[in-house]
Image: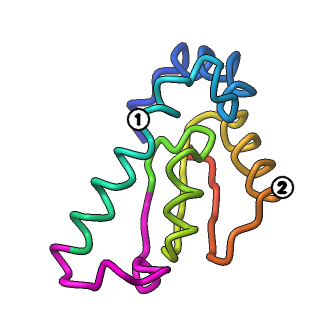
Amino acid sequence: MVSTVDKEEIKNFDKIANEWWNPKGDFQPLHSLNPIRLTYIKEKIEKHFEIGTKKTKPLKKFSVLDVGCGGGLLCEPMARLGATVTGIDASKRNIAVSYTHLRAHETDSYLVCRLLL
């Protein structure tokens, strides 16, 4: 099977994988953008599927696939909004970081982290 995964790029992410959840670390720009990104995605889903915006778990009936999830910066908040989330990534270290953080910060929703082979 042909893969488009760039092994050198994965090595780069492996080196900094422990920085995913450090809001002042290498992924600080993503931490800054994440609330805006999450609001945008949530609003688009609510509008498209005509669901109420006042619900505490507005994405409860939705399944989300996050391809290239990294450390799970988008997966976890989507799960907290009620979605069943599957995050996949080509980096074993990213998946390990995501899984470790998830276990330390349990959500009410189902969240799976998988290695993209």
Q: Is residue 115 magenta?
A: no
User: What is the spatial separation of the Cα atoms under label 1 and label 2, in whole angstroms?
Assistant: 23 Å
Q: Earlier in the sequence, mark 1 or mark 2?
A: 1
- Which of discs 1 and 2 lies nearer the camera? The answer is 1
Name the quarter where the C terminus is drawn: top right
Looking at the image, is 109 positioned above or below residue 92?
below
Residue placed at 59% from the left, 57% from the top? 76
Q: Which residues are magenta?
A: 47-65
Amino acid on which the number 1 mark rests in the picture: Leu
Dominant SS of magenta comes to loop
Q: Say which element carries label 2.
A: helix
Side of 6 relative to 14 (left or right): left
The numbered dot on residue 33 is 1
Q: Position of residue 6 (x, y in %)?
A: 46, 21
Return the residue nearer the eye: 25 or 97. 25
Amino acid on which the number 2 mark rests in the picture: Ala
Q: Say which element carries label 1.
A: helix
Which residue, given by chain and number where applicable, does mark 2 sit on?
104
Q: Position of residue 19 (x, y in %)?
A: 70, 25
Q: Residues within 10 Å of mark 1 (few under 14, many from 20)?
A: few
Q: Position of residue 20 (x, y in %)?
A: 65, 31
Return the residue nearer the eye: 1 or 39. 39
